[in-house]
Amino acid sequence: MERPDDLHVARSAVARLGLVADASTHLTAEVAMHLPFEALTAYKTAVKRFFSTEDWGDADDHALDALVTPHLRSGWFEHDLGAGVRLGHGIRDGRYVIWATGGPPPEPTVFDRAFGGPVRPVQTPHPRKVKFTVGGGPAPGHWYRRGEEVDHPAAAAMLEDPTVTDVMVAGDFVTIGLHRSERWEDRLDDVLARVTELFWDDARPAGSAAARTREALVQEGMSTRVEGARPEDLHLLDSDDPGHRDTLVEALGSADPRARRAAVATLSMSSERPVATAALLTGYHDPALMVRRTALDAAADLEDETYRPLFEAAISDPDPWTRWRAVRAIAELGAAASREPLMFAAVDEEFRVRFEAIAALREIEGE
């Protein structure tokens, strides 16, 4: 059975219009109930990608067919999801097929135009983060944030751009986060050129998310089920999406400090202040230094008076970098309201802390 001509638009519309939950209910009852336990998460992972803007091609169809058909011998199902979108799936000509059709076209964005270079930008659920495919094969990712020690030369070079807040480097993609005051409409071309310069390597084979085998799907699913959401996935989630938020909140209790760190940073970007505040306070009291640093840095990025007490308390933190970042954050908010903590920081044993505190106090005197 051939795909509908509007498959790409329709399947992304399911996500855009908030219809994924309805579609998943049908797919769970009609397919997932028939799958063995070890294949369940792999199936859900594939379905999640189907209802997105990511590429979906013949290789994905074949991988999903190999995963489902041994356990679902017959049956064809169609559903009206609303907003003009229809979902169809089941066995046709001995193969499992899934498709979507209909729905309004998306609003044009800067990502809709053609990109001529080897690196292609892809939207993510997070409005300030964009994924760039850079060739290579899937591999664990490492996340780097501004203000931390970065041992990856290309990531360090990328963070020299003052509009870039964080960089995720994986085997076959790089994700770039922009400061909340920046717009991708204004920065995409420059960032794309810089990512291509720093991360593209035409000597290595280009990876393809569409080329994953059934075994890869199962392995990915088992990894997610056993270990929880991966840190490299968490920072792509939207903290204002209820489903994504549940995943992020759960990750705050992960045994992996990298997952806790990513969850804190992502939840801090929620438009709901109580959500952001709870995550930042949880992160600042985390036993892992990397999580505490991220919490303080993320709070500082918000430039919100709400967090002044946190910064003032952090001036007494045992970690020199945390004390330095706290003083910087206070200076950015306005030093006058925190004169006493700054005077304490002005005699800190760490030169960088003293320097920032004295500079902030001089600004007060000059007012």
Image (cartoon, helix red, strand yellow):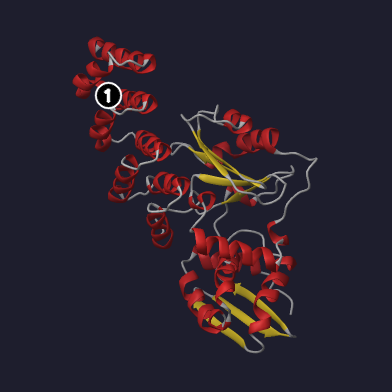
Camera sees residue 105:
no
**Residue 176 at x, y percent in the picture:** 56, 41
Image height of 19 relative to 341, above or below: below
Residue type, label 1: Gly
Quarter location, residue 104: bottom right
Query: Position of 40 compared to 326: left or right?
Result: right
The residue closer to the viewer here, 250 or 185, is 250
The residue closer to the viewer here, 308 or 232, is 232
**Residue 250 at x, y percent in the picture:** 39, 57
Query: Which quarter of the image is occupied by the C terminus?
Result: top left
Task: Count the marks.
Answer: 1
Q: Residue at x 51, y 41 (%)?
A: 177
The residue closer to the viewer here, 187 or 358, is 358
Query: Which quarter of the image is occupied by the N terminus?
Result: bottom right
Q: How crowded is mark 1: few (under 14 residues within 10 Å), some or many (20 or more)?
A: some
Q: Which residue is drawn at 35% across and 18% down?
A: 353
Image height of 104 relative to 192, above or below: below
Extreme residue in the right direction:
203
Secondary structure of residue under mark 1: loop
The residue closer to the viewer here, 151 or 164, is 151
Q: Residue at x 70, y 33 (%)?
A: 197
Camera sees residue 64:
yes
**Residue 87 at x, y percent in the picture:** 58, 77
Identify the residue position indicated by label 1 in the image: 334
**Residue 329 at x, y percent in the picture:** 33, 27
Query: Position of 16 compared to 4: left or right?
Result: left
Query: Position of 198 compared to 286: left or right?
Result: right
Image height of 69 relative to 54, above or below: below
